[in-house]
Amino acid sequence: MDRRDFVKTAGGSVILAVSGTYAFRILTECSAAWTKIDSQPSGRKWGMVIDITKCPPDCTACIDACRYENNVSHHEDERWDVNWIRKVSIEGHVGKKKTEKSVILVCNHCENPPCAQVCPVQATYKRHDGIVIVDHHRCIGCRYCMIACPYNARFFNFKDSEEWPNKNRPKRSHGVAESCHLCAHRLDLGKKPACVEACAMAGNNAIYVGDLNDRESDVSQLLLSHAAKRLKEDLGTSPKVHYIGL
Amino acid sequence: MDIKFESIDGKSFEYRVMMIVFAVLAGVGLLATFYIIQKGLWVTGMYTRVPWGLQIVMAVYYIGLSAGSLVISGLYGVFGKLEYKPFARIAVYIAMLFLIAGLLSILTDQGRMDRVFIQPFVHFNLQSMFSINPILYVGHILICVLYLWALFYEKKKLTKIVATLAFGWAFCVHSGTGAIFGFGARMLYESPLLPASFVAAAMASGTALMIIMIVALFKLTKRHVDDELIIWLGRFLAICVIVVLYFLAVENAYRAYVVELRSAAVYYLFGGMHSLLFWIGLIFIGLVIPMIILFRRKTGKSVKWIVLASSMVIIGVLCERYVIVIPGLTYPPELFAGMEITHSVIEEGIAKYQISFLEVLQAFGVLGVTGFMFGWGLRYMKLLPTEARALNHVAASK
């Protein structure tokens, strides 16, 4: 090997090693970012607990309150109605006995929200306090989030909304996707979400919203004293809506 | 070998009729789109449970068509098959047009089209397939433009570089498009095989399209093309068809085998309209019959039969795109394990979807725009060669 070849080989090896190290670093950083489960050990983390044993099948107080508070559009047609909260009856069998339950479904405000992951414009994002929210001034209406949500909890404003009951909140604009934002505007002011208030007013007290990081909060206490379930936990989305009695 | 490229004079009656038809289609599509913007997307028949409809099916289909054309141009550009040089320009041009068609379909499907040109590029999200894909698509169009430029000015070295880049890029484009669905959490979407099978279907449909285009264009403009060139393309198409069939078989066998996905597989294969499209449109018309035609010695060497087989593949792949997009949406996610939803304010079970008239108009509109640009290109650019001969003929003429 002459000097020229030696310089070439050595230089090549150095370049390869350096670029390889960098590539490895970038890869590990990327993988860390991808696998990071933002568990937010400190600060506020809003979560919801729904006690379905206290939820009577014919009560719609929370749904009505949500519609009023957030001007959620309603067109008298189930195909295009937007339902931030929806109530379903579910049926199962324990042995030969039929069990029937009534459950309300809302956005699960996942720790790893697939809707936010797929949003091409980052219009859907998770706030620091764990609320998954849509910036409806940025959303382009591609509806990929609806495809990605494994809970069918996201809705699209296919039609313009005619109603505008609550003038303090914006009218829902057409052509954008949305879902429950846990009444973030009320939580920020220290108030409870509309559905929680309505449920308490109706005398049911089935819905609780509170800080999951605070051991003393209602929700934490409920979760400590009850066996609660979350929907489709195997997906790794880590929902923050917990169900008691499911 | 010297190949002369000439534009068409564009004064014939047929050409004018074709351009008028395309213009009318484009106009109708534009009107339909305006109407949809005015009224909201609900007029298209899409709804909460089926938020994607025909436009997405068509977008995926068009993007797939663009791939195969690029493959044909790659035969010369990448692999140096000189006898396919005559088709290189037209192939790249078609590849570019169909990618634009795909983008137009996606654009007209958005809830807020006004925001599409800014937001995705300003608020880029590396984790979203929908964010990665526009970069791939726009890159693909730019590469096609550069490729065309290199071909027009006969830059041999640049052609080779750009052709190779375009070839690789096309693979990324189609894998990315497949990943939009394949990486999704829906039961009938989620599949790491989907990006690969997308590439295969894209190659098949694109090659089929190019065969039809070449035969039709050369015949209509009274230019000569050697049968051998088409027969070789037919063989290539046959291989693509086998690969598509193989991927479909693996994917469906997997779904039927895994207990978790079995009910979804049954729905997919025997659950309604889409199953008919799957079995008759895709498997039978789109793959099996063309395969028989292309592999039989007699029919596989006849240009007419090859064109017939190509038309069938094109229809079959359109059905394939439909049965990828729609059943994945209509099949419901299982929200409560072991329990059944008996009552809800929205449709919770298997959803229904019907293609609406407006969506069809929009799809035709996009086709009209594409066709018009194609016709324009034929007239004002030197895309078509005066003749295309197989290699042994080339040697003989020397």
Image (tube, rainbow, N blue to C red):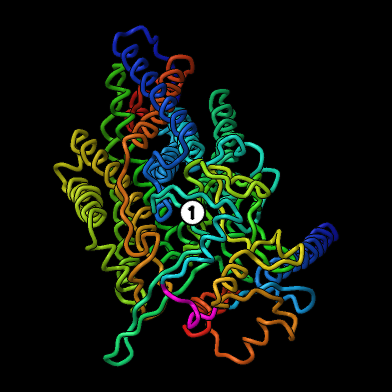
Q: Is residue B236 above or below residue A132?
A: above
Please state the total of marks drawn on the protein image: 1
Q: Does residue A118 appear to the left or right of B278 in the view shown? A: right
**Would residue B360 be found to the left or right of residue A228 on screen?**
left
Pinpoint residue B98: horizontal percent, then vertical percent. 44, 35
Residue B378 in sight from this viewpoint = yes
Image x and y of residue B119, in percent: 66, 42
Residue B212 place in picture, x, y as percent: 29, 33
Type of the residue with mark 1: Val
Mark 1 is surrounded, within 10 Å at the Cα level, by few (under 14), some (14 to 19) or many (20 or more) other residues, namely: many
Secondary structure of the residue carrying tag 1 is loop
Q: Which quadrant holds the N terminus of chain B?
A: top left
Q: Which residue is mark 1?
A: A82
Q: Return the residue nearer the eye: B206 or A192.
A: A192
Q: Measuring 71% from the left and 58% from the top, which residue is drawn there?
A: A185
**Residue lying farthest to the top in this orientation:** B11
Above or below B305: residue A59? below
Q: In which chain is the residue bearing label 1?
A: A
Q: Residue furthest left?
A: B298
Image quadrant where residue B194 sits: bottom left
Provide the residue span drawn in magenta: A50-57
Quadrant of the frame with the C terminus of chain B: top left
